[in-house]
Amino acid sequence: MVVRRIDLWSVLKISLCFYLCGLAVTMVAGVVLWIISSALGVVHNVEQFMGDLLSAKDFKLLSAQILEGTTLLGLVIVILLVIVTLVAAAFYNLFAELIGGVEIIVDED
């Protein structure tokens, strides 16, 4: 069996699902870590340290804005990774035409 071409539409769908699931898992893990660190007082200690460092009395980390920024940054990274994956699949298709593709040998027992 020789893989001579990869359908770019399939690569787009699979990579988009894969990277969006990765972003969702990362965001849920980040929110859980934020809740745990807030419950343990770590967030307050960081706010107090930054307030002392910047000589500000009421320094607060705005969790909603941090979540929004992280989500937007994650979506940008997802888009970039999908583009890189599509370009890699297109290069594979180009090189497979020139060289002949990847040969896969399947043995049946």
Image (spheres, helix red, strand yellow):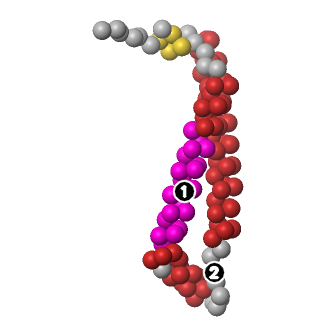
Q: Is residue 82 visible?
A: yes
Q: Provide the residue designation for mark 2.
A: 60
Residue 1 position (above or below residue 30): above
Alpha-carbon span between mark 1 and mark 2: 22 Å
Helix, strand or loop for the magenta stretch, by majority: helix
Vertical side of 4 occupied by 17: above or below: below
| Pointer 2 local density, CA inside 10 Å: few below 14, some 14–19, many at least 20 | some
Q: Residues within 10 Å of mark 1 (few under 14, many from 20)?
A: few
Residue sitting at x 57%, y 44%: 21
Residue that appears at 47% across and 12% down: 103
Which quadrant of the figure has residue 95? top right
| Residue at image coords 67%, 36% | 83
Q: Amino acid at mark 1?
A: Val
Magenta span contains residue 50: no
Magenta segment: 18-37
In terms of image quadrants, where is residue 87?
Answer: top right
Q: Is residue 49 left or right of residue 106?
A: right
> Could you tell me which secondary element the residue under label 2 belongs to?
loop
Which amino acid type is marked by label 2? Lys
**Is 21 one of the magenta-colored residues?**
yes
Instruction: Find residue 62 and name its label.
Output: none
Report the front residue among 9 and 105: 9
Of the 4 image quadrants, the one containing the C terminus is: top left
Residue 100 percent across, percent down from the top left: 55, 10
Residue 59, picture quadrant: bottom right
Q: Relative to 79, is 100 on the left or the right?
A: left
Task: Say which of 14 and 93 sits in front.
Answer: 14
The number of callouts visible is 2
Query: Relative to 96, is 30 above or below?
Result: below
Residue underneath mark 1: 28
